Amino acid sequence: MGTTEPSKITTSPWKAFALVLAFAAAAITTIYLTTRPTESLEPRPAPEETVQEAFARLDRLRERAYETRDISLLDDFLAANSPLRERAREEIGRMRRDQVYVQISSEQQSLAVTESGDRVATLEQVVIQELRFINEEGEDVTSEGEVSERTIVWELIFEGGRWLINDSNLVSD
């Protein structure tokens, strides 16, 4: 009977060394990716824009969306899951159906940051505001054209690298 000798697989020392390095690099990368804190990767608020400045920018965008009846602007000032999003769609849609535009005249009396963190900020705004509804022929069709002082609490969240409006609450009218 013949005996067969087991086959030997030979690899050069350089190939073996390269293979061990590749496995080690893969293991280190896997450990790093699975154990690192993910929050540090999220963008932080830009230090050059204060919460008040961000709110002023967002409030102008909000007014422009209503005045132009442009639903596409909602993404520019509202957070993705904002409860205000559906209400804004309905209000702008109603103005389109009624064929009216809104003219917003507002004068901010005060704006105070009541809570502020890296991801959420709450502001209290006191504003004197007048809304006028104008039809497509340019006629004022406002039924109640009174000027009112409103106190509104706004919640901003930091999402996608920028501050956005998440919610609001009318405290007094």
Image: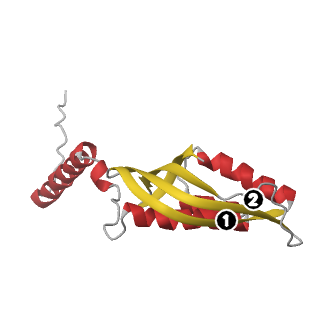
Left or right of 27 on screen, residue 69: right
* Circle 1: element type: strand
Q: Position of residue 142 (x, y in %)?
A: 80, 59
Q: Position of residue 11 (x, y in %)?
A: 16, 54
**Viewer-side residue, 15 vs 168:** 168
Please rate how many residues cluster around mark 2, counting C-alpha atoms within 10 Å: few if below 14, some from 14 to 19, many from 20: few
Q: Position of residue 20 (x, y in %)?
A: 15, 51
1 or 2: tag closer to the N-terminus: 1
**Viewer-side residue, 129 vs 27:** 129
Please rate how many residues cluster around mark 1, counting C-alpha atoms within 10 Å: few if below 14, some from 14 to 19, many from 20: some
Residue depicted at 45% across the width and 60% down the height: 110
Q: What amino acid is labelled 1 in the image?
A: Ile
Left or right of 71 on screen, residue 173: left
Task: Tell me: residue 134, above or below residue 124.
Answer: below
Q: CA distance from mark 1 to mark 2?
A: 11 Å
Q: Which residue is mark 2?
A: 145
Left or right of 13 on screen, residue 107: right
Residue depicted at 85% across the width and 56% down the height: 97
**Viewer-side residue, 33 vs 60:** 60
Q: Which residue is mark 1?
A: 104
Residue depicted at 51% across the width and 54% down the height: 165
- Residue 73, quarter of picture: bottom right
Q: What amino acid is labelled 2 in the image?
A: Gly
Residue depicted at 52% across the width and 52% down the height: 79
Number of labels in the image equals 2
Outermost residue, left side: 13
Nearer mark to the viewer, of 1 and 2: 2
Left or right of 45 on screen, residue 153: right
* Circle 2: element type: loop
